[in-house]
Image (tube, rainbow, N blue to C red):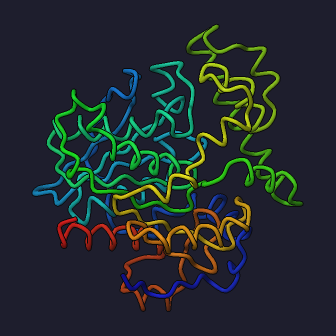
C-alpha cells in the first residue's frame, strides 16, 4: 500500500522533542484538534485469560464495518489515555465498533483484580477473549487489534494468540477468519536492549525514571485495593522499570530473572511467524528504543508478506504529529498522521475482504 509522505512541524524534527511535545503539550490540547465527538461508550467487564476481569468501554455505530480492540502503553488508565481516545473517536466516526480496555493491573482492571502484567504472555489471549465477548454484544468482525508503545506489543501478542485459537478456543464463539490482524504504532519489540539503551542515554534515563515513578504509583494503588496480595516491601524496592518487574512480576510468572522474562515477552522474535495482516508504524528517531532494532525490523518485515512496515524518518515515540503540507497531501482532517494511516489501512483491509 502506498502511503503519503510524513513530515512533522519544523521544530519537532527530533525524536525526543516530538515525544516530549506529545506527552506534555498535545496531551492537554488534543480535543481542540479533532472534530469527531466521543463515541457513546458503555462500560463493561470482560473475562480475559484465566478469567481475569478486564474493564473496558464499548461503542457500536449503526451498520458497523468491523471492530477495533485497543489498549494503551506502559502506564495510565482508560479515563486519561488521550491518545487512545483519539483512536476511539476517529474509528467510530469511520464506522467501526470500538472496544477500549484497561489492560492487566491498570485502571479499573487493576481494581477488579490484583493480577499483575505479563507484557503479552497472557494479554494476547485477553485481546482474543475480549473480541469474542464483544461479538456477543453486537460488534462484528473483522476484529483489528491495536495499541501503541507497550500496548502495541500486547496487540502483536494478540495476533499470535489469534492464530492458535483452534487449539485452545473451544469456548469461543469466534471463527479464526473473524480475527483480521493488527495495526500498531511504535510497539516495544525488544525490552532488554531498549531498556538498557534508555537508561544509558543522557536524556533517556529521565524518561525511564518518570515511567518508573508511575509504575510505583500503580503498585501502591493495587496494594491499597488488594492489601497483602501486593507486597508493600517489594514496592519499596521497585525503583526502576526493571525493578518493578523483578520485585513484583516475574516470580508469579515463573521466570528466574527479568532478562529471561523480557526475552520471553518481547515480540520481535514473533514477527517472522505472524500470518495475519499486521501494520507496524515505526519512527527511526524513536528515543525509547534501541536504534539497531530499525534495521532488524526492516529485514524481518521484508521477508514476511503478512507484515506491512511503515517506517518514517521522524515521528518520535507515539507522536506522529504532522505539519500542514503533510495533512493536505494525505487529505487528513487533522494532525494525527499515525492514527489516520492505521485507519486507512483498516479501511483497505476491510474493502478487500481480509
The spot of residue 2 in percent (x, y) is: 39, 86
The number of callouts visible is 0
The spot of residue 352 in percent (x, y) is: 19, 72
Q: Is residue 277 above or below residue 172?
A: below
**Residue 47 shown left or right of residue 142 in the figure:** right
The spot of residue 163 in percent (x, y) is: 33, 47
The spot of residue 339 in percent (x, y) is: 43, 67
Residue furthest out toward the left: 63
Q: In this view, does 235 lie above or below 39?
A: above
**Residue 290 shown left or right of residue 226 in the figure:** right
Closest to the observer: 270 or 91?
A: 270
Q: In this view, does 241 lie above or below 17?
A: above
Picture quadrant of residue 284:
bottom right
Closest to the observer: 306 or 311?
A: 306
Could you tell me which residue is drawn at 55 percent across and 72 percent down? 320
Closest to the observer: 22 or 173?
A: 173
Could you tell me which residue is drawn at 38 percent across and 81 percent down? 332
Could you tell me which residue is drawn at 60 percent across and 41 percent down? 75
Where, quadrant-wise, is the N terminus in this rendering?
A: bottom left
Could you tell me which residue is drawn at 72 percent across and 25 percent down? 256
**Residue 22 shown left or right of residue 43 in the figure:** right
Residue furthest out toward the top: 228
Where, quadrant-wise, is the C terminus in this rendering?
A: bottom left
**Residue 214 shown left or right of residue 199 in the figure:** left
Amino acid at each position: 500500500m502506498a502511503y503519503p509522505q510524513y513530515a512533522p512541524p519544523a521544530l519537532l524534527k527530533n525524536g525526543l522533542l516530538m515525544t516530549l511535545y506529545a506527552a506534555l503539550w498535545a496531551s492537554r490540547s488534543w480535543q481542540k484538534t479533532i472534530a469527531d465527538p466521543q463515541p457513546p461508550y458503555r462500560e463493561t467487564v470482560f473475562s480475559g485469560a484465566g478469567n481475569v476481569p478486564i474493564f473496558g468501554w464499548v461503542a457500536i455505530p449503526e451498520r458497523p464495518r468491523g471492530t477495533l480492540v485497543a489498549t494503551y502503553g506502559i502506564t495510565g488508565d482508560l479515563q486519561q489515555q488521550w491518545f487512545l481516545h483519539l483512536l476511539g473517536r476517529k474509528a467510530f466516526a469511520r464506522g467501526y465498533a470500538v472496544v477500549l480496555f484497561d489492560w492487566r493491573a491498570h485502571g479499573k482492571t487493576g481494581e477488579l483484580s490484583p493480577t499483575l502484567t505479563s507484557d503479552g504472555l497472557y494479554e494476547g489471549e485477553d485481546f482474543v477473549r475480549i473480541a469474542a465477548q464483544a461479538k456477543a454484544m453486537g460488534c462484528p468482525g473483522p476484529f483489528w487489534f491495536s495499541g501503541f508503545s507497550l500496548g502495541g506489543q500486547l496487540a502483536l501478542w494478540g495476533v499470535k494468540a489469534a492464530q492458535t485459537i483452534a487449539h485452545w478456543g473451544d469456548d469461543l464463539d469466534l471463527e479464526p477468519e473473524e480475527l483480521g490482524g493488527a495495526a500498531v504504532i511504535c510497539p516495544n519489540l525488544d525490552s532488554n536492549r531498549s531498556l538498557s539503551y534508555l537508561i544509558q542515554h543522557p536524556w533517556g534515563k529521565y524518561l525511564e525514571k518518570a515511567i518508573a515513578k508511575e509504575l510505583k504509583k500503580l503498585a501502591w494503588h493495587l496494594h491499597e485495593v488488594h492489601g497483602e496480595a501486593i507486597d508493600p516491601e517489594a514496592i519499596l524496592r521497585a525503583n526502576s522499570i526493571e525493578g518493578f518487574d523483578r520485585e513484583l512480576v516475574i516470580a508469579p510468572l515463573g521466570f528466574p530473572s527479568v532478562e529471561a522474562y523480557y526475552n520471553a515477552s518481547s515480540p520481535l522474535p514473533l514477527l517472522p511467524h505472524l500470518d495475519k495482516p499486521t501494520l507496524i508504524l515505526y519512527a527511526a528517531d524513536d528515543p525509547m528504543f534501541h536504534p539497531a532494532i530499525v534495521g532488524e525490523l526492516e529485514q524481518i518485515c521484508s521477508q514476511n508478506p503478512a507484515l506491512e512496515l511503515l517506517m518514517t524518518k521522524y515521528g518520535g515515540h507515539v507522536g506522529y504529529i504532522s505539519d500542514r503540507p503533510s495533512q493536505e497531501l494525505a487529505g487528513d482532517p487533522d494532525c494525527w498522521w499515525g492514527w489516520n494511516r492505521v485507519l486507512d489501512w483498516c479501511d483497505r483491509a476491510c474493502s478487500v475482504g481480509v
